[in-house]
Amino acid sequence: MSSNDLPSITTTLRALKRTQLHAQNRLRSIHADAQFVASVVDAYALPLLANERCGSWYIDPKAGVRGKQGSAYFKSTDGHAGHCVIVDSTRSGKRMPDALAKTIPLWCAVMNSTLFPSANPETHHALHTPPQCVSPSEHAQMERLIPRYVAELASLEIPQLVELASKIKKPLRPIWVTPNSSLPDAPPAFQEFCPVVCCTASRYATQDAAYVQGAGDDSEGWAMGLTPSLFWANTEKLLAASYGNFPALVAELIAASTMETQNSEAKGISGSRVVERTEIIQITPDLFLTSGGSFDLDILASEFDTTIIITEKGVKRGRNGEDINKQEQEETIEQTATADSSHTSPPLTKHEPPPQNILHLQLPCGKPGSKALRQQLPHIMAFLHRPLIPKTLIASPSTTDLAIGIALAALCTRERGTVGKLDKPFIRKKLALIVAKYPGANPSRATLLAVNSFLMGQEKDR
């Protein structure tokens, strides 16, 4: 073999990197990090929240009181009860995710200034940041942002803040825990403040070929369709599989899970009852959200003046987990963009034809879905237009993203006549109303941009 036939050092290093970042290596790293997260919960005896979407990978749903008690949605670029542990992780090269090092501390300071406006600023309003991650100059820059954020929070006029002030008697303060931290032998008593324990699940790794720091981050790019719940339900199988058989095992587990869900829904369709419908969330007297699998359309037609049902078009994946239907997603966008306001897709149950006050939308997942939503919003708003404001239900398998976008557009469009100008502060106020009523709402940036683009376009046309 000549020297020209030998792989270059660069090629070899790239191959090693791909092996390290393989999904199975990531899952092994997540499984190891989850043991640390459980030890933090035991040490502090506080409820555990996942900072979505990454945090849920590090929490075993079978852990009972040590398991996930709720979700938070702190991002590295924006911010949204004390006495809790919030788990997150970050990629290689960083000791702590920005959400834990910067966003949550800033959020705590803003909340303290809002909830305790007359308290001693030194004890109640101070900004606390981890010095190993936030420099003094950056800390000072963050401090200067607090008055503006306090004013913006007040402008949202969130009524739940009054109730919150009656429950939280001490200021919120972040404390930081990493795998390098020494944990307390017994749960500490916090007399001076309400702790928000910011738990970084992954250890800081510079040279470890078998470990992936922040393995749960950006799972859309590596998980091949796996979800945290599916991973934890099949941990032993997934971690024990050979490297070559791993993609086929993942595809098999996803197919079995999908079939089980479909069979469950099929068995549930009966008579004139609504099937698989979870609790209905009332946003305003005439706007409601719900999630679920199957619905009896005749019942929905009788309960609500108008109903929008969203079904998500999933991503098809090949043998190695690659996305193979990008073109099909783009075709779906084109199809939804040309639908008129009277169009209804085939119903979700076996009833034919669907009632005329029900609109069924099938949208792709992720960013393609947000793009499709932007093109479909004029038709959705035309469908909702009635002489009197209709009692509307928005139903979706997941009410966290696209359904929230539709609800936000509907709220702003309906109240357009009561405001002199529809602007971004007004839109933010309506989004805050939705989040206050439904804390699980977590619209993506792409969805919010789609709604803003639609509403701002309407404002220009007035």
Image (spheres, rainbow, N blue to C red):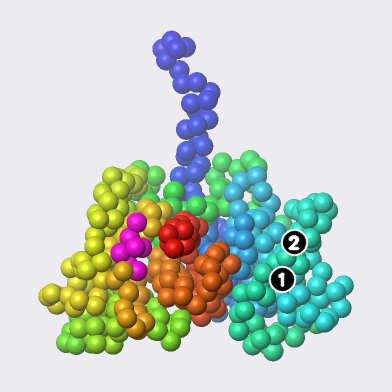
Residue 383 x, y percent position in the rendering: 29, 71
- The residue nearer to you, when weighing 50 against 314, is 314
Is any part of residue 322 visible from this angle? yes
Q: What residue is at 69 percent from the left and 51 percent from the top?
A: 95
Q: Position of residue 124 (x, y in %)?
A: 81, 76
The number of discs equals 2
Q: Amino acid at mark 1?
A: Val
Query: Circle 2 is placed at which residue position?
Result: 145
Q: In the displayed structure, would residue 237 be above or below residue 63?
A: above
Taking the image as shown, residue 389 lies to the left or right of residue 255, namely: right
Q: Secondary structure at mark 2?
A: helix
Q: Quadrant of residue 336?
A: bottom left
Q: Residue at x 36, y 60 (%)?
A: 373
- What residue do we see at 67% from left, 75% from top? 154
| Residue identifier under label 1 | 150
Closer to us: 86 or 462: 462
Q: Is residue 12 magenta?
A: no
Point out the residue furthest to the front here.
462
| Label 2 environment density (alpha carbons within 10 Å; few <14, some 14–19, many ≥20) | few
Q: Which residues are magenta?
A: 375-381
The secondary structure type at the circle numbered 1 is: helix
> Would residue 430 appear left or right of 341 to someone viewing this image?
right
Image quarter (top left, top right, bottom left or bottom right) of the N terminus: top left
Screen quadrant of the C terminus? bottom left
Cα–Cα span, label 1 and label 2: 9 Å
User: Which residue occupies 74% across, 53% down?
Assistant: 133
**Residue 152 location (% of width, % of height):** 67, 69
Q: Earlier in the sequence, mark 1 or mark 2?
A: 2
Question: Is most of the magenta stretch helix, strand or loop?
Answer: helix
Residue 135: give x, y in percent of width and height: 80, 51
Picture quarter containing residue 292?
Answer: bottom left
